[in-house]
Amino acid sequence: MKRQTLNAILTHAVLIITLLAVAFPMYYAFVMATHTHQDAYAFPPILRPGNQLWTNIKTAWTRVNMGLLLRNSTIIACVVSVGKIVFSILAAFAFTHFKFRGSWFLFPLCMVTQMMPLPVRVIPLYRMMADWNWLNTYQALTIPYFASTTGIILFRQFYMTVPAELADAARVDGATPMQYLWHILLPLSWTNVAALLVIEFVYMWNEYLWPNIATTEAGMRVAQIGLRMLYTSERGAAEWNIIMAGLFIIMLPPLIVLIIFRRQFAQGIAMQTTK
Amino acid sequence: MNRFPNHRFLPYALVIPSVAIITIFLIVPFGQAVYLSFHRVSPFGTLRNVGWRNYIEMFRSSEYLFSFRNTMIFSALVIGVGLTIALCIALLTTQKIRGAGFYQIAFIWTYAMSPIIAGVMWSLIFDPSIGIMARFINRATGLSINYYTDPVAAFILVTAASVWIMLGYNICFFVAGLQNVPHELKEAAWIDGATTWQTFWVVTFPMLSPTTAFLVFVNTVYAFFQSFGMIDVVTQGGPNRATEFLIYKIYRDGFGRMQEGQAAAQSVFLFVLIAIVGAVQIYTSTKKSVYDR
C-alpha cells in the first residue's frame, strides 16, 4: 500500500513536470506578447505577464491586415471541412451498405490518397490551376482537398459496427437508402463528424505550402502566410512582442475547435486504432 | 453487406464525388509529375524528353544527396525521439492513478499548432540575443549558439519544434492503443513472474505494433512534407543547407530555379519513399499479431 502511494505521487510529479515543460514554449510566447519592446529585452528575462497585450494585438492586427487573413482562413477551413465530411460519409455509406461491381478497385483507390500528399504533385497541380485560371481563387484553395482517406476510414469503421437489422427494418418500412442515411445513420455519427471536423479544420487552417503557391494577391492571403509576413518583417527589428501577439491570434481558432471537441477527437482516434 | 439490393446505381453516385476529386486532383497530376520527370522544360515552356537523365543526375548530385541525408536524420530523430517521449508519457497516463483521464487529454493541444507557429515559438526560445535556451546554454557552457549561422543549432531547433508539435497526436494514439491491450495478458505475465519491464517488452510493446507502425507513417509524412512551413519561415533551408530537406529542395528547384523536370523527378522519388513506409505500415497492421488466436 505504502509503495503504491509513493508510486502514484511519483507518477503525478513526473506528469505535471512534463506537462509544464511542454506548455512552456506557449507560456513564454504569451509572456512576450504582453510586454513592451523594451521589457521583452530585459535581463534577466521577465517571466511574468505584463499589461501590453491589447496594444500589441492592435499593432499586429493592423500591420498584416489580420481581419482579412482570418476571414480567408475561416472560409477555406470551413468549406474544406464540410466538403470532406459530406464526401466521405457518402463514400463510406456506399462501401459499407452496398455490393457493387468495381468496389474492390474503388476502395483501394480512395486509400491511395494518403500516399500522394500535395507536395509530390504540386508542380503539375500548379500548372493545371494556372491553365484553368484558378490561381488566386477560393476554388483552388478548397476543391482539390475534398477527398479524404481519413474520413472514409473513420466513417467506414463506424458504419461496419451498426447492426444490419437497422437497415433491414428501415427498408421493410419503405425507407429509401438516402432517407435511412439522413434520418438514422447520420444522427448516430455525430462523434465521427466532430472528430473529422477537428482533424480537417486544424489541417486546413495550418496549411501553408499550397496557399503560398496558389495565391499571390494580397486579398487572398491566409493566416499562416500572415504569420510569415509578420515574422520576417519584424524579426529584423526583433519586435518579438508584436510577432507573438499576432501568433496568438492566428493560433486561437484551431485551438478552440480542438478544445471544444477534444473528447470526440480522442474517441475518433480510438476508433481508428481498433480493428 | 448489401443492405439495399434494389439500388444498383446509387452506390456509384455515392462514390463519384470522392473518386472524381481523387482522379482529377491526385491521380492525373501525379501521372503528369511522372511524365514531367522524364523531361526538361525550356524557358519557353516546351518539353524535351531526356529519358532517365533527371534521375541519374539527381542521384549523382552531392547537393541532393546531402539533402537526402539530412532529411533522413531529421525524420529518424522526429520519429525516434518523438515516439519514445510520447510512449513514456502515454504509459504514465494509463497507470491506475487519480486524474488519469485529465492527463490523457491534457497534452492534446499541441495538435492544433501549425508547423509555422511551432517554428516561430521555438525560434524565440533559441533566439541568440533574448532566447531563454540560448542564454541558458551560454550561462552553462560559455558557448553561444546562433541558429542563423550554426547548422547544428538550426537543425536542433527544427527537430525540437517538430517533436513538440507531434507530441499531442502521438500521445493520444498511444493512449488509445494501450487501452486496447487486454489486461488479462499482462496479468498472465505477472503471474508467471515477469517483471514490469519484461511485461512491457513481451506483452505491451508487441500488442502496440499496429499503433506504432501507424504513428511511424504519420510522423514520416510530417517530417517529409508538413515540416515545409517551418523550414520556409524560420531557416529557409539554411544555414549552409543544413535544413534544406527534400520537400524544400523540390520547392526551390521547381518554383525558384524553374527546373520543373528535375523537381518532378525528386517528387516521384519522394513518393516512392513514402509509399514504402506506407506499405510497411499496412503490412504491420493487417498481419495477425503474434498473440492472435
Image: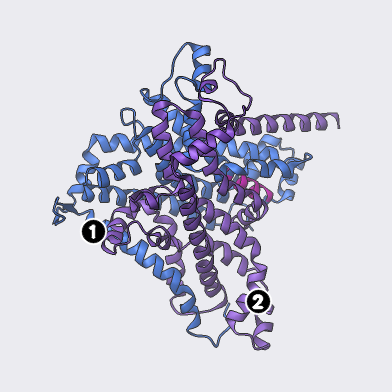
Are labels 2 and 1 on one chain? no
| Of the pair A14 and A198, the residue shown nearer to us | A198
Q: Which type of secondary structure does the marked residue at label 2 adopt?
A: helix
Q: Do the residues labelled 2 and 1 touch (CB within 8 Å)?
A: no
| Of the pair A150 and B125, the residue shown nearer to us | B125
- Residue B208 lies in magenta, yes or no? no
The label on residue A183 is: 2
Q: What letter labels the chain drawn in blue?
A: B
State how far apart marks 2 and 1 are (Cα): 47 Å
- Residue B174 lies in magenta, yes or no? yes
Q: Quadrant of residue A171?
A: bottom right
Graded by Cα atoms within 10 Å as few (under 14), some (14 to 19) or many (20 or more), the crowding at tag 2 reads: few
- Residue type at mark 2: give it: His
Q: What stretch is highlighted in magenta?
A: B169-179
- Residue with the mark numbered 1: B35
- Residue type at mark 1: give it: Tyr
Q: Which residue is drawn at 41% across and 63% down?
A: A143
Query: Is any part of residue B145 visible from this angle?
Result: yes
Chain A colour is purple
Pointer 1 chain: B
Q: Which residue is drawn at 45% across and 44% down?
A: A65
**What secondary structure is the magenta-colored segment mainly?**
helix
Q: Quadrant of residue B75?
A: top left
Q: Position of residue B155 (x, y in %)?
A: 41, 30
Pointer 2 chain: A
